[in-house]
Amino acid sequence: MKLKDIAKIKTGLVLSRKKAALYEVRISYKQLTLKSFSNSTAINLFTLDDFSSADEIKSDYLTQEGDVVVRLRAPSTAIYIDKSMQGLVVSSLMVMIRLNDPNINNKFLAHYLNSGSIQRIFNIAIKGTAIPMIGTRDVAELDVNLPSLAQQNKTVKIMSLLYREQEILKELSIKKQIFTQNTLNTITNQFQEEKL
């Protein structure tokens, strides 16, 4: 089946059409950026931008819990929108996927879209040399072959544990670097004190 058969797929907002000029009344939003995407399907919170709109933005262009958002500019990775990330503006450089099939785990779909096999399909679909991108149609026409809901749920749990392990290892690496630098500083300071 095609992705468009199980989901509503919509390109994000052309931001220049809604951006408030200095003299206009402004409505403030947080906006997803291309830097907000990661392979882990989680949003990088430190990369959200502020967006001032001349008027209210339709909910079609704002994230909702359960949405899967895909970058159209390469690399075309997907993120999952949880409850805490609702109401973010989605630009026209992204596409929102809202599933209408209860037998599909939205978070699994995001992992599925980030898998090597789907990324190869997206890479083949890339158009343009200056700004390599896939089209909304490429996402909509994607053939999806998903496992049972039970298997999807199991995969999501496993992936969550694996990504958490990666975070812990990164934190450990940073702490190890700090420890190493502090140890070097202590040794250097002792050596200098002994010379005095």
Image: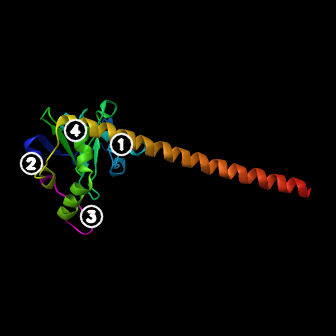
How many residues crowd around disc 1 within 10 Å: few (fewer than 14), some, or many (20 or more)?
Answer: many
Q: Which residues are magenta?
A: 127-137
Q: Quick check: can you spot residue 110?
A: yes
Classify mark 3: helix, strand or loop: loop
Across and down, in percent, residue 67 comes to: 23, 38
- Amino acid found under the numbered disc labelled 3: Ile
Find the distance from the CA under tag 3 to the CA under tag 1: 23 Å
- Secondary structure under tag 4 reads helix
Q: How is the image coloured?
A: rainbow
Whole-number angstrom distance, CA of label 1 to CA of label 2: 26 Å
Would you say the residues marked 3 and 4 are in contact, meaning their CB atoms lie under 8 Å apart? Answer: no
Labels 4, 1: front one: 4
Q: Which disc number belongs to residue 2?
A: 2
Q: Regarding mark 2 in the picture, which secondary structure is present there?
A: loop
Residue at 33%, 51% (x, y): give it: 34
Q: Which mark is residue 131?
A: 3
Which mark is on residue 151? 4
Disc nearer the start of the sequence (1/2): 2
> 58 or 21, which lies in front?
58
Tell me the quarter of the picture where residue 83 sits.
top left
Residue highlighted by disc 1: 43
